[in-house]
Image: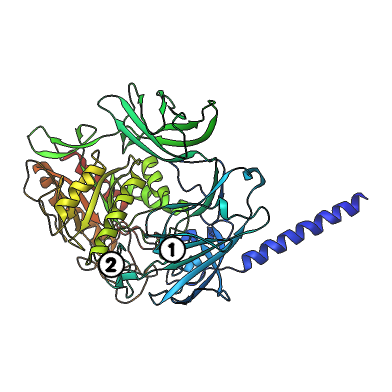
Amino acid sequence: MAIRRKMWYVVLICALLMSCSLVEGKWSPAKAPLMTRWAKDVSPKKAHPEYPRPQMARKDWQNLNGLWDYAILPADVRQVKKYDGKILVPFPVESALSGVMKRVDKENRLWYRRTFKVPKKWKKKRVLLNFGAVDWETTVFVNGKKLGGHRGGYDPFTMDITDALKKKGKQEIMLTVWDPGDEGGQARGKQVRKPEGIVYTPTTGIWQTVWLEAVDKAYIKSLKIVPNIDTGQVSVEAVCSNAAAAYTVEAEAKGAGKAKGGVGKRLIIPVKNAKLWYPDSPYLYDLTVTLKGVDGKAVDSVKSYFGMRKISLGKDSTGVTRMMFNNKVLFQYGPLDQGFWPDGLYTAPTDEALRYDIEAMKKIGCNMLRKHVKIEPLRFHYWCDKLGMIVWQDMPNGNNKTTKDKMRFEVELKRLIDSRFNSPSIVMWVIFNEGWGQYDTPRLARFVKRLDPHRLVSNASGWKDRRVGDIHDVHKYPGPKKPKNEEKRAVVLGEFGGFGRPVKGHLWREKGSWGHHGKTDTEELMTKNYLDLLEKLKPMITEGLSAAVYTQTSDVEIEVNGFMTYDREVFKMDETKVKAANLSLYSASP
């Protein structure tokens, strides 16, 4: 009897393994010109499995990343008769890691489909369907019922799908996505149909995590957290859905204090002897926010965190206006960070890869990065918060030619600020880059400052400065260059450097690579050029320059300006010398 039982177990295990291998066998990465070391860690069962929203985390959730059915059909087709195959979500359809690696132009639509089961313990709960980001125009169906749509390629959105769910069995999600690419006027960053030079392969469809979570009828919809190091307090405001006026919100910061009040009220938590957030000591306070009903019982609770830090303008000891960090002068230096990957394009292959870029720049002495015309997943900002990397966040550019284009740009600009408002690492919003799609700059600078008076605003990085906002930013290749000091604004060098060095065996394309300032063949020569450049930069810091941004973190496609190769395998200069030179910059300001 025991032998039979053991044989039955063996048969069952073999069947399960065969089943798993069949599922795995439906997907394999396509062959990109270049792959990263993290590609081997990607599979249908391991596709960004981490909880995607660290500053408002719930325990009851279900990850929907993995294999979905997909089809690419003419844009006027309204029903899928047969799917083309499997796609690995959340990787964009153009990427190798999606398993598809096909382009979708404005004449076509991309369709997705998958099934899931609702956990039994969610039976009396509301079920929310969350998307980290889908590029660009999305329509969502659940069990054949159209739930609504969303326009925007970078911002998260949520739908309550409860009323569309069947009482039991498998549930079906279907999406259709249309993206006009660079032929449209929407915010798109550096995505183009014909990649070349400083513009790259586009992303279409789902490119960030999709997940479900269970909530009560009344639940916490969003948080707004504002630290104040001058008063030793942090304010917490919970926006709630379907919460009656008699409900209460409680917020508790571990190691600090707690507060309670009515729904929609600002709660003030004392943070005595606050441990301040700095790049070299990025202390984070854990925060729990709970919504309680009339009977005092918790109906929703989320985990979050915050950092006690302040970004402002102020005078240094010589009377020069500078960017101040926690009321002190802190020179900010780091790379232009494009956020592209050879195997995942807009989507990093893994969470470890996302973290690696930040750690690699910290390792060589950088304390800041400028996230360039792209908005990253929330987990990127979590790692910047956790590891201590200051972020200047660009708004992705669009064509902004028509009134509709401009309205959409402003809607997405607001969504960017709202969705990333609580991240302590973000210290500046950059509205435009080099005049790309620039319009109504003074009005938009005021608009952003009203949305977030606690951070600095750069009206435009490079080229068309309209003498508004908190920052005057210039670009110069190879540079360096410093704008004239101003009374009411700090001056920064938003892009410079750009020394190119192609490394054979680590190129997107063996021929046609280029750099902003020529190309060098050796590590020694590139290192020398870099060190000479930083020696020229130092006097400008002493004279009033508040920050500088070197181009760039890594190579991107045929652009070989990176500290690292596109696959992140080779650091192209002498790391020890580069780190020493970078660290020497911080002592150059008063």
Figure check: 221 above or below 328:
below
Question: Is 417 in front, or is 358?
Answer: 417
Q: Is residue 154 left or right of residue 231?
A: right
User: How dense is the environment of label 1, judged by Cα within 10 Å: few (below 14), some, or many (20 and up)?
Assistant: many
Q: Residue 306, how many percent across, how many down?
A: 37, 35
Q: Residue 402, how many percent across, how many down?
A: 23, 66
Q: Is residue 170 left or right of residue 448?
A: right
Report if residue 371 is visible in the image: no
Q: What amino acid is at disc 2?
A: Gly
Q: Residue 581, how many percent across, how many down?
A: 23, 47
Disc tally is 2
Q: Which residue is mark 1?
A: 138
Q: Which residue is mark 2?
A: 185
Q: Is residue 190 left or right of residue 567?
A: left
Find residue 340 and report its image quarter: bottom left
Report if residue 258 is visible in the image: yes
Q: Residue 62, how many percent across, how many down?
A: 57, 49
Q: What amino acid is at disc 1?
A: Thr
- The local secondary structure at tag 2 comes to loop
Residue at screen point 11% across, 39% down = 321
- The local secondary structure at tag 1 comes to strand
Residue at screen point 50% across, 38% down = 218
User: How dense is the environment of label 2, judged by Cα within 10 Å: few (below 14), some, or many (20 and up)?
Assistant: many
